[in-house]
Image (cartoon, rainbow, N blue to C red):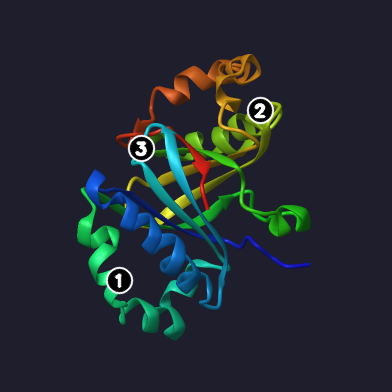
Amino acid sequence: MTVKRGTGLLMVWADVPADKEAEFNRWYNEEHLAERLAVPGFLAGARYEAVKGGPKHLAVYELESPAVLDSAAYKRVQQNPTPWTKRCSPEAIGTTYIRNVYTLIHPRALTPAAAASGMAPALQLGRMDVPAEVDREFNEWYNTIYVPNYEKVPGVIRGRRFRALVGTPTYLTFYEFEHPKVSESAEWTAQRDAVPASARMRAHMRHAPGSPGVYVKTV
């Protein structure tokens, strides 16, 4: 069984000028994605585009652990960018560029089936902070009530939660969907306030611009 998920995520969001988008996509699809996935500890990866929220472009890399990004193999690639990377990377041309590194906080461990599953056709991503005084209650509610309830909705493959080690905001909610319309269903709406605590806890969330965003897999 090939493991495709670990305890880390590298997430890169970007917006790029329209006149540079075609070459940006070619660079990502023909060079950059494969270059990153050749690094030991990069378990899987895919590109997505926003159909709701933003930024528009998203690359998701499933990592064995966040420590992969401290490895000599990764640093060697990162510190020696190709000419195409220097010309077309989101750092070079992006009008928005977000690079966040995350560690898994829910569930505590993945089932073998989840760890071996492929990249989802669609994602819903929530990027948020909450006030420190509700942090503990917020996490308990999210992990034991909110995510499990949404996982009952038809079309939801699974939900995971992460804490940012690099970048902001602090929390990432990562729902994998069978299709991008899942969170528009009546079943999803019914779970939104399935318990009284949900409205109260949701009021504490401070979402990043473009969050929550829905993304469809392109590569």
Q: Is residue 211 above or below residue 80?
A: above
Residue named by callout 3: 54
Residue 99 visible in the current orientation: no
Q: Position of residue 40 (x, y in %)?
A: 55, 78
Q: Nearer the viewer, mark 3 or mark 1?
A: 1
Given the image, on which type of amino acid does mark 2 rest?
Asn
**CA neighbours of label 3 inside 10 A, class few (<14), some (14 to 19), many (20+):** many
Residue at 30% across / 35% down in the picture? 209
Residue 84 numbered mark, or none: 1
Q: Are marks 2 and 3 in contact (CB under 8 Å)?
A: no
Residue named by callout 2: 149
* In the displayed structure image, the side of residue 72 where residue 24 appears, left or right: left
Q: Element at badge 3?
A: loop
The N terminus appears in which quarter of the rendering? bottom right
Given the image, on which type of amino acid does mark 3 rest?
Gly
**CA neighbours of label 1 inside 10 A, class few (<14), some (14 to 19), many (20+):** some
* In the displayed structure image, the side of residue 139 where residue 111 appears, left or right: right
Examine the image and state in which quarter residue 91 appears. bottom left
Q: Sequence-wise, which precedes: disc 2 or disc 3? A: 3
Given the image, on which type of amino acid does mark 1 rest?
Trp
Q: Sequence-wise, which precedes: disc 2 or disc 1? A: 1
Q: Sequence-wise, which precedes: disc 3 or disc 1? A: 3
Q: Who is closer to the viewer here, 212 or 45?
A: 45
Q: Position of residue 149 (x, y in %)?
A: 66, 28
Q: Who is closer to the viewer here, 184 or 151?
A: 184
Residue 111 visible in the current orientation: yes
* In the displayed structure image, the side of residue 190 where residue 214 appears, left or right: left
Q: Who is closer to the viewer here, 188 or 54?
A: 54
Residue at 73% across / 67% down in the picture? 2
**Inter-mark Cα distance, 2 to 3:** 25 Å
Q: Are marks 2 and 1 in contact (CB under 8 Å)?
A: no
